[in-house]
Amino acid sequence: MRLAGCFTALKGPGMNIAILYILISVLGSATGQLLLKKGMNSLGPITLSLNQLPAILWQMATNLNVFFGLAIYLVGTVFWLAALSRVDLSFAYPFASFNYVVMLAASWMMFGEQITLNRLLGTLVIGIGVLLISRN
């Protein structure tokens, strides 16, 4: 198995733009998720059932936080697809884990969620892993 050939797509002038696309994708995904959570918090707990599904979907569709959360998430997905067209998936995908780092801090700041030591340490390990992978 030739591993050296796996990283040929990671070199060259397009690499910086690919990393930028990945970071925009991560931020879009995180921002979208935060807006989705904010919107769903305002709707309260929902129970999915076939007879209530149309009403629940209408509530979600007309909630501005849910609407913009989905829109921003979609923009992040477009940037993710652009990044995938430039770099190996095995390089790009670990960056998606960087969402854990962003979400940990953002959920604490925005929603007052408790951050346990295990969550903090686990997220730190993920962040270090992403940094190691990005340094090919």
Image (cartoon, rainbow, N blue to C red):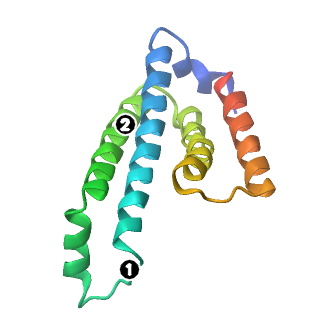
Tag shown at residue 22: none
Residue 133 picture location, percent across and down: 68, 30
Counting residues from the N terminus, which is met first, the one under dot 1 or under dot 2? 1
Residue at 69% x, 29% y is 131
Is 133 situated above or below 11?
A: below
Check residue 81 in the rendering and tell me which mark sits there, or answer none: 2
Choose mark 1 or mark 2, whichever is in front.
Answer: 1
**Above or below — where is 122 with respect to 96?**
below
Question: What kind of element bears circle 1?
Answer: loop
- For this rendering, which residue is in front, 114 or 85? 114
Quadrant housing the N terminus: top right
Check disc 2 and report its element: helix, strand or loop.
Answer: helix
Horizontal side of 55 relative to 20 (left or right) equals left
| Front residue of this view, candidates 104 and 44 | 44
> Measured along the vertical axis of the image, is residue 135 above or below residue 98?
above
Q: Inspect the image, locate mark 2, and give the three-letter code of the amino acid beneath it.
A: Leu
Q: In screen coordinates, is 59 left or right of 125? A: left
Taking 124 as reference, is 69 left or right? left
Residue at image coords 57%, 19%: 8
- From the viewer's perspective, is 47 left or right of 92? left
Disc ID at residue 46: 1
Quadrant in the rendering for residue 56: bottom left
Q: Position of residue 77 (x, y in %)?
A: 36, 42
Badge 1 crowding class, 10 Å Cα cut-off, few under 14, some 14 to 19, many 20 or more, is few
Image spot of residue 48 (x, y percent): 35, 83
Quick one: quadrant of the C terminus? top right
The residue depicted at 60 percent of the width and 51 percent of the height is 108
Disc 1 vs disc 2: Cβ atoms closer than 8 Å? Answer: no
Query: How far across and how far down the image is residue 34, in percent?
Result: 44, 51
Q: Few, some or many C-alpha atoms within 10 Å of disc 2 (few <14, some 14-19, many ≥20)?
A: some
The residue nearer to you, when weighing 47 against 19, is: 47
